[in-house]
C-alpha cells in the first residue's frame, strides 16, 4: 500500500490544463484543427484590423480641413462588394471541410477491441468511477494504463455535468437518462487535471476530476489492490454513514455517496476540494459544510469519541 | 401643400409649468412613443448599473484564488441574475427603447402604429423585471430554500426541476422572464406594423433609413424567436406546478430537449441584441464620415441573411451533448455561414469611412472601437463554431470572453455611440465632448483589460461559473488582471452618468441638427414635439436632408 | 426652404398617391406568425415524446378520434365567413344567425373536449403527471383549447353588443380580424388533430 502511494507521488502532475499542450490523441486532433483555425482567423484579423486602423488614420479630419467641403459621395461598388463576399465564402468552405473531417475522425473512431472500459457517473458534486470488467468502484480519480486507450461511458445520476480533462480530451456532457461516450489515451504516466464543465449547482466549482495514467503493470497492481474488500468495523457500521456509502466486504451498502472501500488510496477528499490528509479527513467528517458549503454530505454531529473511531477506521481503508 | 419648413418655423413644445405630480402623471400615463422610448432606455441603464455591480462583486471574488468575498450560493445567484438581467432587462429594453424613440421619427410618422399597446409593452416589461428582482425577497418560498434564482441564465434542465431547485426562486426566474417577454413581443409587433404601415409619403422600403431596416429585421427575429422560450418556460411551469414530465428524466423526459428549445430562442437572441448596434453604426458612421452608407442594398441583404441563417444554428451551443457527427457538422457549417454576411457588414462600414472625412467625436470613437472589438468577437466566434475546437472551448472562460466581446465590446459600445449621437435630439443639449472622450478611453482600457485575459483563462482550462479555484492551476495572474479592468470600466460608466446629469442641467444647447444629419429625425426640433412633425414630410431618397442641403447634388437624382 | 420643394412640385402627387397597408391587417398577420411559433414548439415536444412514455395508458388505448368535434370546429370556420359576408352586405339578420351558429359550433367543440378530458381523467386515469403522453397531450390540446376559449369570448362579445343594438357594421374591420383569428385556431386544430390522433396513435 505504501508502494501504491509512492507510485502516485512519483507521477508528474499536470495541474495547468493548457489545451494547447495536448497529451492524448483526441486533444491532439482538436489542437491541430485549433492551430489551423487560429492561423486563418489570425490572418483575417491582421488584414481587416489593419484596414480599419489605416482607414481611420488616413481619413481622419485634420485641423486645416474645410469643414464645409463634403468628400466625394460614393454609394457602393459592385466589383468590390462581390470580391469581399466571395473571399469569405471560400474561407468558410475550407473551414467547414476541415471541421467535418476532424469531427468524423474523433467521433466515428471505432475504439480498439481491447480497450479498458470505464463508466463515469456524475453526481452533485463528485464523480463515480466504475470498472465493470474489474468490479472496481471508486471516485474522483480515473486510473488508466498508458499505451492503450480507455473508453468512457458517461452517465449522470442527477443533473447535467461535463467531462473535461483539457490535455486529454475536449468536453462531453454527462446527461441523465442518456449515455454518452468519450475516450482518452494518455501517452505519458502522470496525473491530469480536469473540472466539471457544465454548471451543475452550488458546488460546481469543487467538482474536480483527476486522470491518473500509469504504466500498464502499475495499473494492474492498482487494480488488484482496489479489488480487495475491506475489513468490517462495528463502530462505523452503527453510524448512519452506511446509508450513503458503500464499503466492499462490509454491510455498508449506501449508494448516494462515493464508495469508500479504498478511500486512502485517493489523493483528495470532497472531489478535489481538499487534500487527503489525516487532519483534513477529520475536519471533513466533522463538518463537511465548512470545507465544501452546500455539499450533500450532512454534518452528523458526531461526538469526539465517534469521530475518532470513524477517522481511525477510514484511515485503515488503504 | 404638404411640407415641413426647414430650418425656420419649426414647432416647439410648449413650455408648460407643471407640478411634480402632473409631470409624474404625464410620464406614467403617456402613450407617446418618445417618452416610452426614453423610459425603456432609462430603465435599461438602471438595470445595466445593477448588473454591472453584480459583475464587479464576482470579479472581486475571482480576483484571488480561494477567495471568500461571497459564498457559492451567493455567487451562483450573482451570475444567474447578472446574465438574465443583461440579456432580458438591459439588451431587450434597449432594443425596444431605441426603436420606439427613433423609428417613427425616421420614417416621418407621428407615433407608433399602436400607441396604447406600446405603453402596455413597457409596463408589463417593467413588471417582469421587478418580479425577477422580487425573488431576492420572495424567492425563499414557503420551504425557505434559496432566494434569487441560481440556475444560470440558460436554466438547464433538470437543474430547474423541483427535485434540484426547491423553493420559488426558479419560478420567479420563469415568470419574470415570461412576462417581460410578452412586453418585448408586443413592442416588436408594434415596430413591424409601424414600419410597414406608417411611412411618410415617398418613403419606400428602399429609401428607408438603414436603422429602420435593421430594427425591422430585429423585431421579426423577436416575434419568431421569443415564443420558443415562452413555450419552453410554460412547459417548465407545468413540470414544476402540475407535476408534468416534459423535462423529467425519471419519467423518460429529455434534458437535452430544453437545450434545443432554449437555444432556438437563445442564438437568435444574440443577434436580436447585437442588431441595435448594427443599426446605430449604420447611421453614425456615414454622418461622421460625411459619406453615404457604402453598399446599402448589400447591407440590407446581409441583415436579412443573418436574420434567417441565425434561426438555424442553435445547436452550436450543444456540441458537447453528444450529437451525431452529422448534426455537429451541420451546425458547425451553418454557424460559420453567419460569418459571411457579418463580414460584409464590417467591410461595408469600413468602406463607408474610406475616402471620407472622419470627424472623430465621441460617437464615432465608439463606432471605431466597435469595429475592432466586434471583429475579434466574430473571429473567436468562428473558433467556437468549429466543433472540435469547441469541445475544448465550450463552457470555458474563453466563451465568457467571446460573448462579452460581442455584447460589451459590440452592443454596449454601439449603444454608447447611439446615446452620444441622439442625446441632443432627445434633450436639446449636447453631451460634454471632453468627458465623452474620457468615458471612451477609460471604457476601452477597462474593457480590454477585463475581457482579453478571459480568453487565456479558457485556454488554460478554467471552466465558467465556478465561484472559486485553487492557486496552483495557473489561473491566478489573468484573473487578477481581469478583475483590475473593472475599475476603469466602472469609472467610465460613472463618468457617463455624470455627463448625462450635468449636460441635462447645464449642457451646451444642441440646436435641432447638431451633427449635420441626413435622416428625418433631424428635421424636427430637439426635443421633438409630441406630434413629431407639424406637417408630414415627403421624401424621395434615403437621405432627405442631404437633398435639402445640397439642392444641386441631391441623392434622388441617382437613386431609383 | 421647404423639404418638399426640393422635389420640384412632385410632392403633392407623391402624397396623394401614397397608400400604406392597413395597420390592423398587418398587426393580426404578425400576431398569427408569433402564435404559430409558440404552437410549433408544443407540437415538436409532442412529436419528440411519441412512444417515449415509460408506463401506460398509451394513446392507442385511450384516444378516440374526435370526429364530431372536428367537423364542428371546421364548419364554424365556414359559418364565420358567411357571417362576415352578410355583415359586409349589411344583412344584419343573416349575420346574427351565422354568428350564433359559429358560437354554437365552437361551444360544441369545447364541450366535446371537456367530455373527452373527463373520460381520460376519471375512467382511464390519465392525468398530466401520469406519463409523457399525459403531459404532452394535455398541454398541446389545452393550449389549443385555451385559444378556442379566447376566440369564444370575443365571439360572445360581438354577439352581446350586436344584440344590445350596437351598430356592428361600423366595426366590420374588427369582425374580420376576429374571423381571421378563428381561422387560425381552426388551422392549428388540423395540425393538432393530425399529430395527436393520427400520427401519435
Ligand atoms: Cu458541474
Ligand atoms: Cu449562438
Image (spheres, coloured by chain):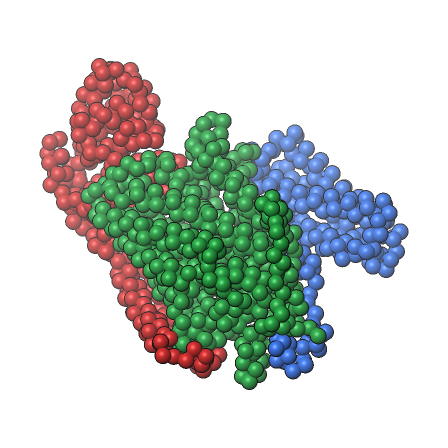
Quadrant where the C terminus of chain B sits is bottom right
State whether residue B462 is above or below residue A310.
below
Q: Is residue A192 left or right of residue C105?
A: left
Quadrant where the N terminus of chain B sits is bottom right
Residue A46, x across and y down, in percent: 29, 69
Q: Is residue B76 left or right of residue B30?
A: left
Looking at the rendered structure, the number of numbered marks drawn on it comes to 0
Q: For this rendering, which residue is in front, A186 or B527?
A: B527
Q: Is residue B147 left or right of residue C107?
A: left
Q: For this rendering, which residue is in front, A289 or A135?
A: A289
Q: The chain drawn blue is chain what?
A: C
At x 52% / y 35%, what residue is drawn? Answer: B240
Kindly tell me whether residue C159 is visible in this rendering.
Answer: yes
Q: For this rendering, which residue is in front, B64 or C3?
A: C3
State whether residue A155 is above or below residue B219.
above
Q: The chain drawn red is chain what?
A: A
Q: For this rendering, which residue is in front, B431 or B454?
A: B431
Residue B479, x across and y down, in percent: 26, 48
Residue A279, x across and y down, in percent: 18, 26
Q: The chain drawn green is chain what?
A: B
At x 68% / y 50%, what residue is drawn? Answer: C185
Kindly tell me whether residue B231 is visible in this rendering.
Answer: no
Amino acid at each position: 500500500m505504501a508502494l501504491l502511494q509512492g507510485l502516485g507521488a512519483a507521477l508528474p502532475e499536470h495541474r495547468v490544463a493548457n489545451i494547447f499542450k495536448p497529451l492524448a490523441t483526441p486533444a491532439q486532433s482538436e489542437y491541430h484543427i485549433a492551430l489551423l483555425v487560429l492561423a486563418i482567423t489570425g490572418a483575417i484579423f491582421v488584414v481587416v484590423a489593419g484596414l480599419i486602423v489605416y482607414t481611420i488614420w488616413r481619413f481622419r479630419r485634420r485641423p486645416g480641413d474645410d469643414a464645409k467641403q463634403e468628400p466625394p459621395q460614393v454609394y457602393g461598388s459592385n466589383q468590390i462588394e462581390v470580391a469581399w463576399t466571395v473571399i469569405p465564402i471560400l474561407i468558410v468552405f475550407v473551414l467547414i471541410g476541415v471541421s467535418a473531417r476532424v469531427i468524423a475522425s474523433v467521433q466515428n473512431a471505432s475504439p480498439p477491441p481491447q480497450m479498458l472500459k470505464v463508466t463515469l457517473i456524475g453526481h452533485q458534486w463528485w464523480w463515480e468511477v466504475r470498472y465493470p470488467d474489474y468490479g472496481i468502484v471508486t471516485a474522483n480519480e480515473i486510473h488508466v494504463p498508458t499505451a492503450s486507450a480507455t473508453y468512457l461511458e458517461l452517465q449522470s445520476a442527477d443533473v447535467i455535468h461535463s467531462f473535461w480533462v483539457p490535455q486529454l480530451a475536449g468536453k462531453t456532457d454527462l446527461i441523465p437518462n442518456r449515455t454518452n461516450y468519450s475516450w482518452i489515451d494518455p501517452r505519458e504516466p502522470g496525473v491530469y487535471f480536469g473540472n466539471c464543465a457544465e454548471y451543475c449547482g452550488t458546488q460546481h466549482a469543487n467538482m474536480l476530476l483527476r486522470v491518473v495514467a500509469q504504466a500498464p503493470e502499475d495499473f494492474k497492481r492498482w487494480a488488484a489492490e482496489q479489488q480487495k474488500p475491506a475489513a468490517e468495523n462495528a463502530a462505523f457500521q452503527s453510524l448512519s454513514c452506511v446509508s450513503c456509502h458503500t464499503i466492499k466486504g462490509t454491510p455498508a451498502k449506501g449508494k448516494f455517496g462515493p464508495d469508500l472501500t479504498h478511500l486512502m488510496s485517493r489523493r483528495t477528499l470532497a472531489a478535489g476540494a481538499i487534500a487527503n490528509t489525516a487532519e483534513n479527513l477529520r475536519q471533513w467528517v466533522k463538518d463537511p459544510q465548512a470545507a465544501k458549503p452546500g455539499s450533500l454530505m450532512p454534518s452528523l454531529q458526531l461526538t469526539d469519541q465517534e469521530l475518532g473511531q470513524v477517522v481511525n477506521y477510514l484511515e485503515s481503508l488503504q | 401643400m404638404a411640407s415641413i419648413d426647414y430650418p425656420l418655423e419649426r414647432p416647439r413644445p410648449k413650455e408648460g409649468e407643471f407640478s411634480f405630480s402632473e409631470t409624474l402623471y404625464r410620464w406614467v400615463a403617456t402613450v407617446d412613443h418618445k417618452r416610452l422610448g426614453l423610459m425603456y432606455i432609462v430603465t435599461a441603464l438602471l438595470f445595466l448599473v445593477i448588473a454591472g455591480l453584480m459583475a464587479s462583486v464576482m470579479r472581486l471574488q475571482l480576483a484571488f484564488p480561494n477567495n471568500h468575498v461571497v459564498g457559492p450560493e451567493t455567487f451562483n445567484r450573482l451570475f444567474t441574475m447578472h446574465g438574465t438581467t443583461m440579456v432580458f432587462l438591459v439588451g431587450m429594453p434597449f432594443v425596444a427603447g431605441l426603436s420606439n424613440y427613433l423609428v417613427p421619427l425616421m420614417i416621418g410618422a407621428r407615433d407608433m402604429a399602436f400607441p396604447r399597446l406600446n405603453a402596455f409593452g413597457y409596463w408589463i416589461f417593467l413588471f417582469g423585471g421587478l418580479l425577477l428582482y422580487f425573488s431576492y425577497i420572495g424567492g425563499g418560498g414557503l420551504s425557505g430554500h434559496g432566494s434569487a434564482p441560481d440556475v444560470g441564465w440558460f436554466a438547464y434542465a433538470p437543474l430547474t426541476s423541483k427535485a434540484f431547485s426547491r423553493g420559488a426562486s426558479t419560478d420567479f426566474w420563469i415568470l419574470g422572464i415570461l412576462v417581460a417577454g410578452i412586453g418585448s413581443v408586443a413592442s416588436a409587433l408594434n415596430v413591424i406594423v409601424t414600419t410597414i404601415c406608417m411611412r411618410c409619403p415617398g418613403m419606400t422600403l428602399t429609401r428607408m433609413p438603414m436603422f429602420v431596416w435593421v430594427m425591422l429585421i430585429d423585431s421579426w427575429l423577436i416575434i419568431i424567436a421569443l415564443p420558443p422560450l415562452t413555450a419552453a418556460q410554460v412547459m417548465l411551469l407545468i413540470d414544476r406546478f402540475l407535476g408534468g414530465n416534459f423535462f423529467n428524466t425519471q419519467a423518460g423526459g429529455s434534458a437535452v430537449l430544453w437545450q434545443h428549445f432554449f437555444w432556438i430562442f437563445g442564438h437568435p437572441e444574440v443577434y436580436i441584441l447585437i442588431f441595435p448596434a448594427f443599426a446605430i453604426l449604420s447611421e453614425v458612421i456615414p454622418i461622421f464620415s460625411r459619406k453615404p452608407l457604402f453598399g446599402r442594398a448589400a447591407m440590407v441583404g446581409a441583415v436579412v441573411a443573418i436574420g434567417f441563417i441565425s434561426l438555424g444554428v442553435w445547436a452550436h451551443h450543444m456540441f458537447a451533448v453528444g450529437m451525431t457527427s452529422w448534426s455537429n457538422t451541420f451546425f458547425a457549417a451553418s454557424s460559420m455561414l453567419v460569418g459571411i454576411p457579418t463580414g460584409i457588414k464590417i467591410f461595408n462600414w469600413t468602406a463607408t469611412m474610406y475616402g471620407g472625412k472622419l470627424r472623430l467625436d465621441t460617437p464615432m470613437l465608439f463606432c471605431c472601437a466597435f469595429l475592432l472589438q466586434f471583429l475579434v468577437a466574430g473571429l473567436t466566434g468562428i473558433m467556437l463554431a468549429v466543433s472540435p475546437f469547441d469541445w475544448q472551448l465550450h463552457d470555458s472562460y474563453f466563451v465568457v470572453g467571446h460573448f462579452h466581446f460581442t455584447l460589451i465590446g459590440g452592443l454596449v459600445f454601439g449603444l454608447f455611440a447611439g446615446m452620444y449621437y441622439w442625446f441632443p435630439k432627445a434633450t436639446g443639449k449636447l453631451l460634454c465632448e471632453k468627458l465623452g472622450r474620457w468615458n471612451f478611453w477609460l471604457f476601452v482600457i477597462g474593457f480590454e483589460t477585463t475581457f482579453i485575459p478571459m480568453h487565456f483563462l479558457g485556454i488554460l482550462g478554467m471552466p465558467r461559473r465556478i465561484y472559486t479555484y485553487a492557486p496552483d492551476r495557473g489561473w491566478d495572474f489573468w484573473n487578477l488582471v481581469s478583475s483590475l479592468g473593472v475599475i476603469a470600466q466602472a469609472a467610465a460608466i460613472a463618468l457617463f452618468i455624470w455627463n448625462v446629469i450635468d449636460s441635462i442641467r447645464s449642457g451646451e444647447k444642441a440646436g435641432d441638427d447638431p451633427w449635420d444629419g441626413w435622416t428625418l429625425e433631424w428635421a424636427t426640433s430637439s426635443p421633438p414635439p409630441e406630434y413629431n412633425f407639424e406637417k408630414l414630410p415627403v421624401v424621395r431618397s434615403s437621405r432627405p436632408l442631404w437633398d435639402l442641403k445640397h439642392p444641386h447634388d441631391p441623392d434622388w437624382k441617382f437613386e431609383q | 426652404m421647404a423639404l418638399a420643394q426640393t422635389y420640384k412640385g412632385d410632392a403633392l402627387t407623391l402624397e396623394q398617391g401614397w397608400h400604406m397597408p392597413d395597420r390592423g391587417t398587418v398587426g393580426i398577420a404578425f400576431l398569427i406568425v408569433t402564435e404559430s411559433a409558440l404552437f410549433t414548439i408544443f407540437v415538436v415536444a409532442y412529436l419528440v415524446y411519441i412512444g417515449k412514455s415509460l408506463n401506460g395508458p398509451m394513446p392507442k388505448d385511450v384516444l378516440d378520434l374526435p370526429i364530431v368535434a372536428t367537423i364542428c370546429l371546421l364548419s364554424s370556420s365556414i359559418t364565420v365567413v358567411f357571417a362576415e359576408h352578410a355583415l359586409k352586405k349589411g344583412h344584419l339578420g343573416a349575420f346574427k344567425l351565422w354568428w350564433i351558429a359559429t358560437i354554437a359550433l365552437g361551444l360544441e367543440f369545447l364541450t366535446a373536449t371537456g367530455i373527452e378530458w373527463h373520460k381520460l381523467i376519471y375512467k382511464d386515469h390519465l392525468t398530466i403527471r401520469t406519463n409523457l403522453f399525459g403531459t404532452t397531450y394535455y398541454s398541446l390540446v389545452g393550449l389549443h383549447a385555451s385559444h378556442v376559449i379566447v376566440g369564444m369570448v370575443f365571439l360572445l362579445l360581438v354577439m352581446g353588443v350586436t344584440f344590445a343594438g350596437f351598430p356592428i357594421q361600423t366595426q366590420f374591420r374588427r369582425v374580420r380580424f376576429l374571423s381571421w383569428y378563428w381561422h387560425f385556431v381552426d388551422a392549428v386544430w388540423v395540425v393538432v388533430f393530425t399529430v395527436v390522433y393520427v400520427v401519435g396513435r
